[in-house]
Amino acid sequence: MDERMVAVLGFALASAGMVLWYRRFRLPFSAFLTGCFVLGAIYALTASTANLTGMMLGRGGLNGLFDLRESPAFATATLLFGIGAFLVGMWFDTRDPHRLGRHAATAFWCHLLAAPALVNTVAVTLLGGGGSGGIGLLAVALLAITVLALVIDRRSFLTAAIAYIALVIAWVMGEGDGAQWIFILIVLGALITAIGTWWVQLRAVVMKALPDFPGKDRLPPYSMPE
């Protein structure tokens, strides 16, 4: 076998071992390690040597890898992995909507894997379009991601999007010097702090506004504050 298949099989066997470990010991962190090994197998299978070499030499960085147009196999695999990790996380979440036991803890680690995989792929691909159109689509995507984070009551998705929110704020304010970037970071910090402070109230408003959908009653409970 060549080096690529050795890596794929190594990661695959490691992920299978972690699944057996979880079935025996029920350790939530095992889900994170399993996801990392699965991600390693996917990347070893789909990443082109040219892209990886360019990243190691500082040409193109991660942007080319996560852009669906520049690296379709790698970026699509990342997107599918993110969707899979999100669905697994939601399966665990719906088994423990009050977030009291190991199912919720396991879901946390699954969402911690899903959030950057989904956010990076979507954001980098939209930014690759360039111009105000790409920024506008990115802003819409970030708004949808924020609503999703509120609905499932998981802040990891919002955390993964912070850097891209900063890019949108910078584009709205226009390019400037270091002093302007300080102001941009202050605005970003104030925005994130406000969302975190009024998270419960914002979630209640969003959940009340949404119509009933399958599984809504199995999400964490919410109520309108008095």
Image (tube, grey):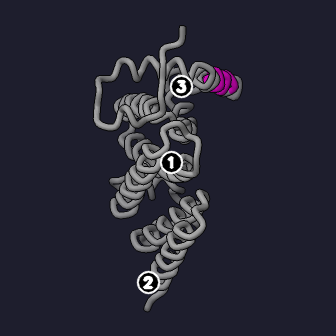
Residue 4: image x %, image y %? 46, 81
* Magenta stretch encompasses residue 140: no
Asked if labels 3 and 2 touch by Cβ distance under 8 angstroms, the answer is no
Disc 3 residue type? Ile
- Mark 2 and mark 3 lie on one chain; the one further toward the N terminus is 2
Residue 171: image x %, image y %? 50, 27
Disc 2 residue type? Met
Residue closer to the observer: 3 or 195: 195
- Mark 1 and mark 3 lie on one chain; the one further toward the N terminus is 1
Please name the predominant secondary structure of the magenta segment in the image. Answer: helix
The residue most toward the top is 226
Residue 5 numbered tag: 2
Residue 176 can be seen in this image = no
Q: Residues within 10 Å of mark 2 (few under 14, many from 20)?
A: few
Q: Quadrant of the N terminus?
A: bottom left
Q: Residues within 10 Å of mark 1 (few under 14, many from 20)?
A: many
Foreground label between 1 and 3? 1
Residue 165 numbered tag: none
- Mark 1 and mark 2 lie on one chain; the one further toward the N terminus is 2
**Residue at mark 2 to residue at mark 3: CA–CA distance:** 43 Å
Q: Is residue 91 above or below residue 225?
A: below
Q: Which residue is mark 1?
A: 111
Q: Secondary structure at mark 2?
A: helix
Q: Which residues are magenta?
A: 182-190
Residue 9: image x %, image y %? 46, 81
Q: Residue at x 51, y 40 (%)?
A: 157
Q: Quadrant of the C terminus?
A: top right
Asked if labels 2 and 1 touch by Cβ distance under 8 angstroms, the answer is no
Asked if labels 3 and 1 touch by Cβ distance under 8 angstroms, the answer is no
Residue 20: image x %, image y %? 52, 73
Q: Which residue is mark 3?
A: 169
Residue 22 can be seen in this image = yes
